[in-house]
Image (tube, rainbow, N blue to C red):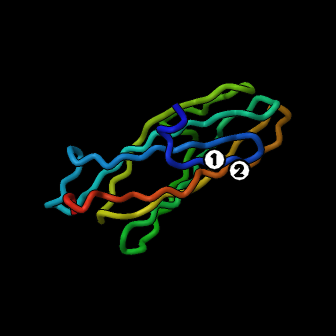
């Protein structure tokens, strides 16, 4: 199953895996809109429970414009993960260019109350040449 995920980052026992796909059926190339869907899997390989509190994204389009997105949780949830558990979610990203990238981090709280940031790996957003 892990081969589905093209990108991964490990921070303090938390692995964040990403699979990304361009969605031509959700894109409007003639209107200058390209759309990708990304699947995230967060795996707790540490020895204590953690809860995802916030997300921090840096989305860069093909012109170099950067959009910073911050908020509570992921897709309306602040999942708690026991050691050995994982959490999956799917979301999307529209861009006004056929290429760009995403990266960022999640803020987690451990069972002991301490907090840390887990890296979300850099991943490219690239539409096929036929879609640009």
State the residue at coordinates (24%, 62%).
129
Indicate the secondary structure of the residue bearing disc 2. Answer: strand
What whole-number distance in Å separates the C-alpha atoms at marks 2 and 1?
Answer: 6 Å
Q: Position of residue 98 (x, y in %)?
A: 29, 63
Give the vertical position of 103 relative to 51 (above or below).
below
**Which residue was labeled with disc 1?**
106
SS at circle 1: strand
The answer to whether 72 appears left or right of 97 in the picture is right
Q: Which residue is mark 2?
A: 117
* N-term mark: 2 or 1: 1
Characterize the local packing of mark 2: few (<14), some (14-19) or many (20 or more) Cα atoms within 10 angstroms: some
* Residue nearer the viewer, 60 or 16: 16
Please identify the residue farthest to the left as the structure is shown. Answer: 30
Left or right side of 61 for 16: right
| Image quarter (top left, top right, bottom left or bottom right) of the C terminus | bottom left
Q: Position of residue 56 (x, y in %)?
A: 58, 53
Q: Are marks 2 and 1 in contact (CB under 8 Å)?
A: yes
Q: Quadrant of residue 113?
A: top right
Residue 112, compared with residue 28, is above or below; it is: above
Indicate left or right for 52 with 31 as reference. Answer: right
The quadrant where residue 16 appears = top right
Q: Residue at x 49, y 34 (%)?
A: 89
In the picture as drawn, the residue positioned furthest to the front comes out as 3
Is 71 or 55 nearer to us in this picture? 55
Seen in the picture, residue 19 relative to 63 is either above or below; the reply is above
Crowding at dot 1, Cα within 10 Å, few <14 / some 14-19 / many 20+, comes out as many
**Residue depicted at x 23% and y 45%:** 26
């Amino acid at each position: 199953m892990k081969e589905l995920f093209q990108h991964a980052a490990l921070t303090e026992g938390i692995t964040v895996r990403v699979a990304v796909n361009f969605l031509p059926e959700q894109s409007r190339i003639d209107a200058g809109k390209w759309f990708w869907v990304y699947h995230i899997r967060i795996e707790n390989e540490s020895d204590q429970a953690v809860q995802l509190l916030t997300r921090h994204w840096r989305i860069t389009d093909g012109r170099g414009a950067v959009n910073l997105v911050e908020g509570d949780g992921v897709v309306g949830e602040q999942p708690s993960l026991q050691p050995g558990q994982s959490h999956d979610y799917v979301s999307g990203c529209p861009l006004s260019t056929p290429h760009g990238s995403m990266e960022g981090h999640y803020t987690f709280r451990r069972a002991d109350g301490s907090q840390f940031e887990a890296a979300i790996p850099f991943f490219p957003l690239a539409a096929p040449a036929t879609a640009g």
